[in-house]
Image: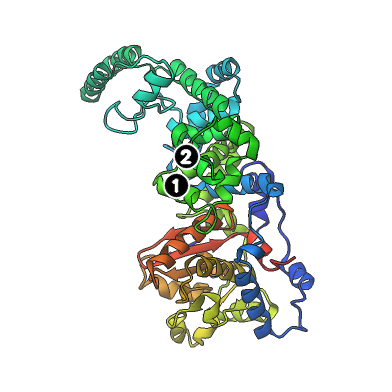
């Protein structure tokens, strides 16, 4: 898997594609502000960056800890962090999915007005659930979630009052699958929509709107209503009560109001060491329930851009799907410095644009002994390839510090890949099937790989928690490879260069 200035990412954000509100800050300005100039020796500088970032992972010092004042920022960042799967899995791509979905806007607006909900949110739910396809099911038969709003049979009949003759719907679905006559397929689909209203677009939209209305009244909060659409009202109630340390008695809406609960607070303020029961529930669903709100918000953003600038959406989608992570959206090739040869890496280290990796197991990570092994074939010292952008170094150290704190496991993570130049990358392509002959984020210093070998199950679980939390904050994105976890750091890694600032 492959993935400095990075102004393109934040320009796209400002355009409304990804909702983060930030601007690129030149590395030289950061270095000056932090006193990282010539007066501080290089070895001391990189150790200080790493140690301060690692120490910042402790709860009492964490610059990324939840606070109510940062709720909107965290929600925006989570919207970005959760967006990759939408770009990657939208049938026919996000532009085609948006085009299918927006044709139902008149029905969506009418249903939203009738049920007192936001039409943009309802439209985003339809986009996310079915990509605007009225006839799909989540499984082989209509026993699964089905239709434009992907409603399960029991919810349709017991909560929403929809008509669902499941036996007849299954029989008609089988006949539709067997038919090769388009006219007959249309007729059978109309028959199915009459006996199973989930396949009637208007009724499906009304059903989704009714669900959001019911859930909104129950929780007293629109964000929680959206979360419950996938998680389920009962499951979300259990999470909220676990977070609040409350029993099963009393209306859940009263608890939400009394404690000022928002989903962002519950999500970002729960971890293996804090609000453990709520965190275990969220982590234990095994599906997209815990991230559903962020994906709905990302869908809203995608639909907005589709209406205003479909060409920009297509360009963003190309970057978002170029790799298995958002790495090319973080750092587009056309806007990112790439190291062509060993001399350019050496110059970047001297200029402070790259930071050599220190060897300090107390940080929770160490460079693997084989890191840079191909340097000999280029006549170079392997140490040359043991470097990262300062932002990436700080993020690596923060991530490892978080793992160390969560697991209490001193055995360090092992970094197997860091910066490369194009010459090194070309050598690697010949022996590593995961290496790309095209644009690699390793040749920019923004990516590193961590070996998938852990000192204990506790460390493995803590590492997964850290990866998911930092990706939810759009600080990183990661991909699972056969032997390693490939991590790319966004420009937001700069905030960990000065965690106490």
- What mark, if any, has residue 79 been given in the picture? none
Residue beneath the point at 35% across and 24% down: 154
- What mark, if any, has residue 238 been given in the picture? 2
Residue 188, given in percent of the width and then of the height, sits at 28, 15
- Which one is nearer the viewer's eye here, 137 or 408? 408
User: Which of the 4 quarters of the picture holds residue 182?
Assistant: top left
Q: CA distance from mark 1 to mark 2?
A: 8 Å
CB within 8 Å, label 1 to label 2 = yes
Quadrant holding the N terminus: bottom left
Q: Is residue 374 above or below residue 457?
A: below
Say which element carries label 1: helix
Question: Which one is earlier in the sequence, the residue at label 1 or at label 2?
Answer: 2
Q: To which residue does mark 1 refer?
A: 281
Residue beneath the point at 50% across and 75% down: 365
Judging from the image, the colouring scheme is: rainbow
Say which element carries label 2: helix
| Direction from residue 276 to residue 157 in the image, left or right | left
Q: Is residue 316 visible?
A: no
Q: Which class describes the residues within 10 Å of circle 2: few (<14), some (14-19), or many (20+)?
A: some
Q: Which class describes the residues within 10 Å of circle 1: few (<14), some (14-19), or many (20+)?
A: some
Residue 460, given in percent of the width and then of the height, sits at 41, 65
Quadrant holding the C terminus: bottom right
């Amino acid at each position: 898997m492959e993935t400095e200035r990075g102004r393109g990412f934040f320009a796209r954000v400002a355009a409304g594609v990804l909702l983060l509100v930030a601007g690129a800050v030149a590395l030289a300005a950061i270095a000056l502000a932090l006193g990282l100039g010539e007066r501080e020796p290089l070895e001391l500088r990189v150790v200080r960056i790493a140690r301060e970032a690692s120490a910042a992972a402790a709860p009492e010092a964490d610059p990324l800890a939840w606070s109510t004042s940062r709720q909107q920022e965290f929600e925006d960042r989570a919207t970005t962090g959760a967006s990759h799967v939408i770009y990657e899995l939208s049938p026919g791509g996000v532009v085609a999915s948006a085009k299918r979905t927006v044709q139902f806007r008149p029905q969506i607006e009418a249903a939203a007005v009738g049920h007192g909900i936001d039409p943009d949110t309802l439209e985003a739910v339809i986009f996310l659930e079915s990509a605007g396809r009225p006839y799909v099911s989540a499984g082989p038969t209509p026993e699964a979630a089905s239709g434009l709003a992907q409603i399960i049979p029991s919810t349709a009949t017991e909560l929403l009052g929809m008509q669902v003759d499941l036996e007849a719907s299954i029989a008609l679905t089988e006949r539709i699958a067997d038919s090769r006559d388009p006219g007959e397929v249309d007729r059978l689909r109309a028959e199915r929509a009459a006996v199973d209203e989930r396949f009637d677009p208007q009724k499906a939209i009304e059903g989704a709107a009714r669900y959001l209305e019911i859930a909104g009244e129950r929780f007293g909060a629109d964000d929680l209503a959206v979360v419950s659409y996938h998680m389920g009202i009962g499951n979300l109630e259990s999470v909220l009560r676990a977070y609040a340390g409350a029993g099963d008695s009393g209306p859940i809406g009263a608890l939400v109001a009394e404690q000022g609960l928002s989903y962002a607070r519950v999500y970002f303020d729960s971890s293996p060491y804090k609000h453990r029961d709520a965190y275990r529930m969220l982590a234990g669903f095994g599906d997209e329930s815990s991230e559903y709100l962020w994906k709905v918000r990302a869908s809203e953003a995608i639909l907005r851009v589709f209406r205003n600038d479909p060409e920009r959406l297509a360009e963003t989608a190309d970057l978002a799907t170029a790799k298995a992570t958002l790495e090319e959206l973080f750092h587009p090739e056309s806007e990112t410095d790439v190291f062509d040869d060993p001399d350019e890496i050496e110059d970047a280290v001297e200029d402070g644009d790259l930071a050599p990796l220190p060897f300090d197991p107390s940080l929770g990570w160490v460079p693997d002994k084989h890191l840079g092994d191909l340097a000999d074939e280029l006549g170079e010292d392997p140490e040359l390839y043991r470097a990262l952008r300062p932002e990436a170094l700080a993020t690596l150290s923060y991530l490892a510090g978080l793992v160390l704190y969560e697991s209490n496991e001193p055995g360090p993570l092992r970094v197997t890949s860091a910066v490369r130049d194009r010459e090194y990358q070309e050598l690697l392509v010949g022996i590593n099937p995961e290496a790309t002959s095209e644009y690699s984020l390793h040749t920019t210093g923004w990516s590193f790989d961590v070996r998938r070998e852990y000192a204990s199950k506790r460390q493995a679980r803590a590492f997964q928690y850290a990866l998911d939390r930092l990706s939810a904050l759009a600080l990183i994105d990661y991909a699972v490879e056969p032997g390693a976890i490939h991590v790319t750091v966004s420009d937001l890694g700069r905030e960990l260069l000065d965690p106490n600032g």
